[in-house]
Amino acid sequence: MVSRVIPVEPFDLVIFGATGDLARRKILPGLFRRFIAGQMPPEARIIGAARARHDDAEYRRIVREAIAEFASEDVRRSDGISAFLERVHYLPIDATGEAGWKELAAMIRPGLVHAFYFSVAPGLFGALAERLHQFAIADERSRIVVEKPFGRSLETARELNATLARHFRESQIYRIDHYLGKETVQNLMAVRFANILFEPLWNAQFVDHIQITVAETVGVGGRGEYYDKAGAMRDMVQNHLMQLLCLIAMEPPSRFNPDSVRDEKLKVIRALEPVQAHHIVRGQYVGGAQGPSYRDDVGNPKSRTESFIALKCQISNWRWAGTPFYLRTGKKLRARISEIAVVFKDAPHAIFGQDTGRHRNILSIRLQPNEGITLGVTIKEPGPGGMRLIDVPLDMTFADALGDEVEDIPEAYERLVMDVIRGDQTLFMRGDEVEAAWAWTDPIIEGWEAMGDVPKPYDVGSAGPEDAMMLMHRDGRRWREIR
Ligand code: NAP
């Protein structure tokens, strides 16, 4: 079964920061995949821009190498690369200077969809918006794509929103959170809102608690300087974990359209109670046989930045009153896994005499690796051994169910870029959502700073600090294993 790919409208996509890490690792290989999938119309054009003085031929070589290095095996084997590269151009442009802007204005074709991807340091977003306006490059139909981080506090996010709003309407601004581009995240919405099975149980009466884990095995990589000023709260919780929390907790929107979905997500963030200090555990990995410490990695021997965070939060509304949400994320942990687990309550009466709490239905939504959804159900152990119960996963992993079609599931970035071209903002964060998320995280961060809080140490390759386990144990619960 081959999935139906509908080509998007002809477009000019300008990537500012076109020689950078993100462009080479994600955006360009993703665009190539959409090209070979047949989603790009013949008139589509990609214009790379950065300060370095390349010409088209040199930039095409960079793109070819990026695809060879970062695209998946099946894509690398495709012979469409030369045809793709014909659509790729390059202009040397300085976001803060005059160079290149007139040439860009002359190159953009009127009447098409224009998208401008700001894949540069956030300090340049304002300058780019300003120049696009000054040189009359952007018009009413233009879209801008803005990368994370979107500010580092409520105040800075507000300033950034105001800067962009000077030249673009909210409907033209696409704030990327690539977690929202994952197939499973959208499937989560389908599972919740297209089936009658789950929604009646999706509340405090039947759900014991919800866990969201985003565990990484990698450290800070080359981003040490940025990360040490941000930490896990700003880098992961304020955006990715918060977005996942919204999708799992939100009310059914009246329609699946951008503003209905984003209105419901915003209500979740606004209903979040402030987190109490003893419901948060910050951690920082220490060095040893497994590798260098966080402080070595970032080159800051006195750093108090957290590379791990676990917290318990509550949503004050009718649906979730009293249901804890446990969030955790960290670097250099035992395994790479992103998962949302909805842990249902015990059956009200254990007629089989089994320990209560031993057999619980858990809906696991796994974003990586092996994207998919499983529902743990309790059944009778097969055989003549009497009425013994075991838990088995009911697998909703679409890779198995959909066979060949799954090969063509776009990855997060390519899906999101195509959504930009289509003008669909459903999977992008609205300005007020981002501000509300900062309004919730700011007091937590300010509290640490005021107290001079020092993160708890944890070993590289572990599941985080011991205190994070205790956060759950105190409530008679435990984290899902990181493996
Ligand atoms: P990067 O590797 O440092 O690349 C920066 C790019 O911007 C280069 O192409 C650079 O080329 C260009 N640039 C720098 N100054 C410029 C100027 N004044 N005018 C025009 N172009 C300029 O950065 P990155 O890792 O790709 O990150 C880009 C953005 O994505 C950042 O906002 C980052 O936070 C965000 N992001 C990155 C990742 C990731 O995995 N890398 C993940 C999430 C978000 P020249 O020096 O030749 O100008």
Image (tube, rainbow, N blue to C red):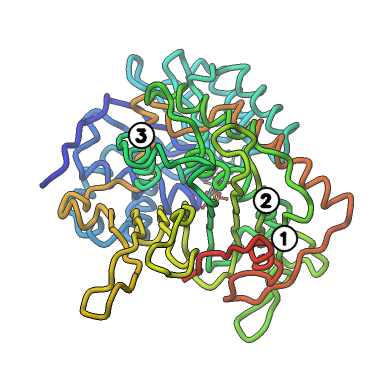
Q: Which residue is disc 3 drawn over? A: 193
Percent across and percent down for residue 208 are 53, 51
The one nearer the camera, 210 or 206, is 206
Other residues around mark 3 within 10 Å, as few (<14) / some (14–19) / many (≥20): some
C-alpha span from label 3 to label 1: 34 Å
Q: Which residue is disc 2 drawn over? A: 233
**Image quarter for residue 140?**
top left
Other residues around mark 1 within 10 Å, as few (<14) / some (14–19) / many (≥20): many
- Disc with the residue nearer the chain's start (3 vs 1): 3
Amino acid type, label 2: Met
- Disc with the residue nearer the chain's start (2 vs 1): 2
Check whether the beta carbons of the residues at disc 2 and disc 3 lie within 8 A of each other. Answer: no
Percent across and percent down for residue 319 are 54, 35
In this rendering, the label closer to the viewer, 2 or 1: 1
Helix, strand, or loop for circle 1? Answer: strand
The one nearer the camera, 285 or 24, is 285
Which residue is rendered at x = 52% and y = 45% of the image?
52
- Disc with the residue nearer the chain's start (2 vs 3): 3
Amino acid type, label 3: Phe
Percent across and percent down for residue 80 are 19, 48
Q: Is residue 230 above or below residue 98?
A: below
C-alpha span from label 2 to label 1: 11 Å
Q: Is residue 405 above or below residue 384?
A: above
